[in-house]
Every structure is written in C-alpha cells, then in structure tokens.
Amino acid sequence: MNTKGFSTIILAAGKGTRMKSSLPKVLHRIGGKSMLQHVIDAAEDAGATQNIVVVGFGRDKVETAIGNTARIVVQQEQLGTGHAVLQAEPLITKNDTVMILCGDTPLLTTKILKNFYESHINTGAQASVLTAVMPDPAGYGRIIRNFNGEFKKIVEHKDASISEKAITEVNTGIYCFNAASLFPALHQVGHDNAQGEYYLPDVLEILQKENEKINAIAADNYESTLGINSREQLAHAEKILHHRKNHQLMNSGVTIMDPDTTYIDSTVVIGQDTVIYPSTWLQGNCIIGANCEIGPCSRFSDTIIKDGAIISFTYAHDCEIGANATVGPYVHLRPHTKIAANVHIGNFVEVKNSNVGTGTKLPHLSYIGDSDIGSGVNMGCGCITVNYDGKNKHRTTIEDNAFIGCNSNMVAPVKIGKNSYVGAGSTITKDVPDGSLAVGRARQTNIEKWHDKRN
Ligand code: UD1
Ligand code: CA
C-alpha cells in the first residue's frame, strides 16, 4: 500500500441556511466541540499530512475557531462545492492524494477514513466516493449505477427524478482523488442545474466518461457519515455521539444507569466501577476516578474527581475534588476550588477559589469564597466568608481543627487560628489567635414581664 499519506480539503464555506443561525453551520457544537473540529481531528488521526479548510461565510469566526489546526483558503462567493474545492488547488501538488470532506459531518470516525483511504489506494482508482445506504435519503445526492452495478453518476436531490429519488444509496460527500485527475476535471464542471451551482460530484461523471476508474464504495455504518443541515439533525447527531461515548465507557467498566439522559464529552476519562446516575452532564477535560458515585442531576466541566468521591445534585467547574469526599445535594463549586480527601460539603453550599483541607465539614447553607480552610475544620450552618468590600476581594484563612459556630461571618482579610472556636452568630473582623474562643455579637438582654407591660 502507498503510505505517503493524503491532504484533506474540508469544505466549510457555506452559510448553512437550513440552520437558521447567525453562526456558520460548521461552528455549531456537539459533544463539546464544533462540528468542523470533529472532522479535522478525525482526519488528523487518520493520517492526513495537511488539512485545508475552505472558509467563506463567517470566515473570521471559523478561522478563530480552528486556530492552527488547519490551513485556510477563502472562497469569496459560495458558488457550490466544486467551486469550493478549486480554491484549494494552489496548495495541492500534482502527485498528492486528496481526501475531500465536509465540515458538517461530525460523526466521522478515524477508522472510516482510514479504511476509505486504503480502499482508494488498493483499487488503483483515480477517484473514490464513499457512499451510504440511508433509511431517509432525502436531501442527499443519489448514487446512480449502471445495470452491472458500476458507478455512473451522482444526481442531487433537487435535480432527481421521482425514480432517482427512490434510490437509498447516497453520496456522503467524502471523496478521494488523485490530484492529477481531480483538478483538470473540476475546471470542466458547469452550473447548469437546479441550484445554478458548480457541483463537485459532477467531477465523477466527467472522469467516468473519460474511462477513468471510479471506486464507489459503501460505508458499513451510515450513521457515522450523516451530514447535518438542520437543528433537528444536530440534536440527533448529539445523541449518537453521546451513545457512542456511553457505550465505550460501559465497556470499560463504568456503570451508566440511564444512557439516554447521560451526556459525556469524548474528552472525559472515568475509572472502573464508578456509577453515573441519571441526568448527568460531564464536559471538557473531566477526569473522574474509580469507585465514585456521580449524579443524579449534576453538571461538571473541567473537573478532577478522585477515587471514591460521592457527589449528587452538584454543579462544579474547573475544580478538584479529593478522594472519598462527599458533596451535595445542591452544591455549586466554582473555579479554582480544591477540595481535599474526605471532605464533606452538604446542602446549599457554594465554594469559590478556595482550598478546603482534609476531613473538613461544610455541611449546610454556607458561602466560602477566596478562602484557605485547613483540615478537620467544622463549620456550622449558614457561615459566610465576607470576601468583597465593594472594590476588592480579600482572603480568609481558617486553620486546622477550628470550630465555627452557626451563622457566623468572617470579614476578610481575617485569620482564624488553629484549634480556635467562633461563637454562633459572630461577625469576626479581627484575627483569632490559636486555641481561643472568639465571640463577636451583641450581648443578649432579657426585658422581664414584657408581655404584661405591652397589654
Ligand atoms: C452535498 C453533496 C451531496 C451529498 C451531501 C452529503 C454537492 C453538490 N452535493 O450536498 O451529493 O449527498 O453533500 O452531505 O456537493 N460548501 C462550500 N462552498 C459552497 C457550497 C458548500 O464550502 O459554495 C460546503 C458547505 O459549507 C458544507 C459542504 O460544502 O460544509 C456541503 O455543502 P451543503 O450545502 O451542505 O451540501 P449538500 O446540499 O448537503
Ligand atoms: Ca450537507
């Protein structure tokens, strides 16, 4: 087999009218990244030596989104897929093999692209087209074969006759060409069709008429080649992607109680014997250990959760949660929060930009912001670190084994020393030395016989 690799041309200049969106179609996201990025990543993994993306509508947004993961060429006017490919001609050398992909097919797998490229090389064809048999072929170009089953041409849905529309084998929009055949044929393509566009698939008919060898080969899994043209199709693709990830995780020893309501990005890593409860969403670079219980009704992004943690009804982003910690229900962990092992965080607690030491308990109704809390601290119900003076944020330090009574405010910057106590209902504005009791509240006055005096 020829192993010199291939260049890709990824078509992404169209507006995506059917999405009804101001965002270019290929930038709509599924499974945590844009449709276009899925395609670029799959091509990269399949061994592409260079990826060229054709941009047009919303080109600035598309260029920013792909960064340096691909080269860019601009199609000023969207005159059709054939015209789009022509824009990349200057970047392709004559001996190249070119794989053409569309930016709106996010379910493509590396395996499909590798197999397709190998089939193109092994059959010695000048052009190969990947086809698929779709249960609902509406909208796709149909594959027309002759009575021997050999490839003849592709007819677009809008140009198809009733009998052609009945054909279920479609063009996936994925092709391999020898560059030396592609570009001369592409220059001959006209635009005499229902959409007045230069159709890329017409190249195949031109080459076929020149008696070049065309390899039209069916993908074994049509789902991976689905093209997304509408929001409904986007939602459908999202489901497929999530089921794929759930399937892979379950096969590696993760229990997912309800795959239908569990959304896990492809980037997430989860250890063995962890159980994911229903309605849970894991996004971005989450790394979850073994033997954890996650959910129900939780959302995590870019969060590290160590072995044995039990977390329910929680939203955490950009955090770290230690081994065997118990968190929830109804907890919000905000960025730059580091929770150590064996910590307990209970009902209605918010923690932001703080460190919480081993075995510390924050059981109910507290706000902890910009704080460094040691280990073995017990915080009563309803405590607040008062971190903002209206202009600046300040830190609170609570050292090991301190005991904070219910409904206390720690006005930062302030430090509560080791083994010290804060009386319930205190507002602490001065540092508390190690081992002492601080009481910062008005003394109680009892006015006797009050009831009688009022009447
Ligand atoms: C295209 C194919 C069709 C195939 C289907 C597979 C043509 C004429 N038709 O139809 O046979 O079944 O894909 O999904 O090729 N684009 C540009 N510049 C343009 C026009 C389009 O870059 O001038 C890009 C779009 O951004 C998109 C891709 O090409 O990523 C496909 O365009 P789209 O309009 O979605 O083509 P389909 O009608 O789906
Ligand atoms: Ca399409």
Image: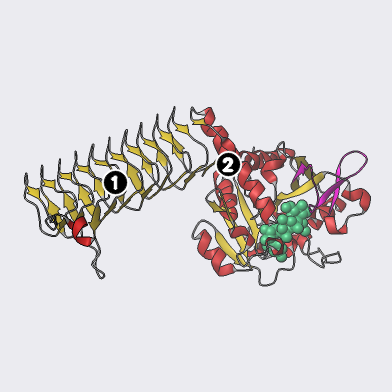
Residue pictured at 52% horizontal, 59% vertical: 66
- Give the tally of numbered discs: 2
Is residue 425 visible in the rendered image? The answer is: yes
Q: Residue at x 52, y 61 (%)?
A: 65
Amino acid type, residue under disc 2 in the picture:
His
Q: What colour-coding does the image apply? A: secondary structure
- Image quarter for residue 240? top right
Q: Quadrant of residue 414?
A: bottom left
Determine contact: label 2, label 1, CB under 8 Å: no
From the image, tell me which residue sits under label 2: 242
Horizontally, residue 383 falls left or right of residue 154, namely left
- Give the left or right position of residue 36, taking residue 316 as reference: right
Question: In the rendered structure, does residue 142 fall within the stretch colored magenta?
Answer: yes
Marks 2 and 1, Cα distance to the nearest angstrom? 29 Å
Q: Secondary structure at mark 2?
A: helix
Mark 2 Cα-neighbour bin, 10 Å: few <14, some 14–19, many ≥20: many
Q: Which residues are magenta?
A: 130-156
SS category of the residue bearing label 1: strand
Identify residue type, mark 1.
Lys
